[in-house]
Image (cartoon, helix red, strand yellow):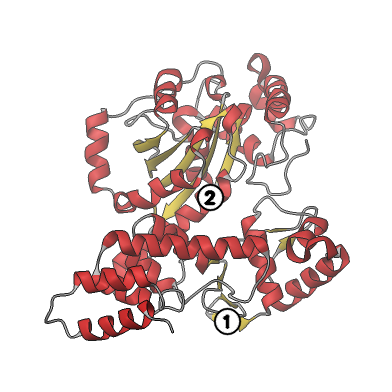
Amino acid sequence: MAISPNPWLAVDSTTDNQSWALSLERARDRALRSGEGREQLDGDRRQPELRNLVLGSWRRSLAAGVDPEHGLAPTAVSADDAARRWETHPLACAAPLLRGLLDDVAADTQQMVLVCDVDGTLLWRAGDPRVLEAASEDINLHPGSVWSESAVGTNAMGTALAESHALQIFSSEHFTRGIRDWTCSAAPVHDPMSGETLGVIDLTGELATAHPNGLAMVQATARMVEERLRVRALGMMDEPVPAASFSGHSLKVTGRQRGELRHGGKSIQISQRHSELLVLLSLLPQGASAEQLAFEMYGDLGKPVSVRAELHRLRQRTGIAIGEQPYRIAEPLLIDALSVQRLARAGMVDAALDLYDGPLLPNSQVPLIAELRDRVDDALRATVLAGGDPVAIERWLATPSGRDDLVATKALIGGLSPADPRRAASLSRLRRLSNPH
């Protein structure tokens, strides 16, 4: 395997994890052998397996005096103290979103979600009980332990804080030998008003269960948390949720035949085909070939040359960075439909409804997009009905997807008092839906 063209990504869906881990272990041993690590890292260019990101972090780890062979994360505070800190931490309000990150990975991937404060102290974690126990016993990964680079060397949480960027650390890219059996993806979270770093969100699992989309999922979660914090800070819980506070593009595709792309305070309308391509590439964060995209969009009649031409026009029209071999979105892109789905799964029904204008690209017949359209609608509807709030149900019924929802109409009527003026209109809707002819 060659190093990914994305400098922040360690592995993707094509990586043979075991083989790559062995290659990295050999490269690590050569680079840090017999106390010559600093000299080797400064001058050795014979380690093609090692990313510049990793080499830079190893240099910082050596300078901090971390022991690469026997280093272990120290414990700064007790678990009870860590829990008390978490209760008052700004990121605690986003716990439902963080648990939603676990929901987004299959149960059998045996992952855990972690949150550290800006100093690298682990405050909160959740996930597979067996993995949580193994992490505590094997590498001291428990609430109250410290995961800054200066404390334990290169790791996703500490290095993401040091670089102020989302990144992934795989196997022997970790500085200390004891962590080599783990893979972590982490993204810092910033105060959307001040820009101050608040902490870091991490998705961690054992080597054999590394999730191929872990980095993309953590990045998306961090953006959603920042969006949530921005809404709270502005006191806008009943106002439309603004686009996430990040420097990339955002794409509005719910309730639209053609997407609206926003960037830097400006917006342009793009074609349905270009909208489909951007949504598809977001669903395939590790990239796809022209052949794969042609099949996804056109089936067996798809022509790769047509896809290449559309991608060229898309770049020219939007300025979005799209990498090649494979094709992939090479910069942050926030799509409202995916935000709605994540907010709904986290139980944040008002925020989800604020973003939702209707079905995703309703005329699109691309199978993956049709599946996502149904998943978004189903997630939002289920959250609305589970909450039982008449206002939220009424808002759902006002959308194109909800206007003919018989179950939701009955739920609204059941939640209204006999004297509520909305009851008459709801009963009229019920009669219409119950007698369609």
Circle 2 packing at 10 Å, graded few (<14), some (14-19), many (20+), is many
- In whole angstroms, how far apart are the C-alphas of marks 2 and 1? 26 Å
At horizontal 60% and vertical 32% (from top left) the residue drawn is 58
Going by the numbered disc 1, the residue's amino acid type is Ser
Furthest toward the left, the residue is: 419
Q: Is residue 12 left or right of residue 291?
A: left
Disc 1 secondary structure class = strand
At horizontal 43% and vertical 72% (from top left) the residue drawn is 355
- The percent coordinates of residue 30 (x first, y second) are 72, 20
Q: Is residue 427 visible?
A: yes
- The percent coordinates of residue 71 (x first, y second) are 49, 20
Of residues 111 and 191, the one drawn nearer to the viewer in this rendering: 111
Going by the numbered disc 2, the residue's amino acid type is Met
- Check the picture and name the quadrant holding the C terminus: bottom left
Task: Kindly identify which numbered label has been placed on residue 152.
Answer: none
Residue under label 2: 217
Residue under label 1: 267
Disc 2 secondary structure class = helix
- The percent coordinates of residue 79 (x first, y second) are 27, 29
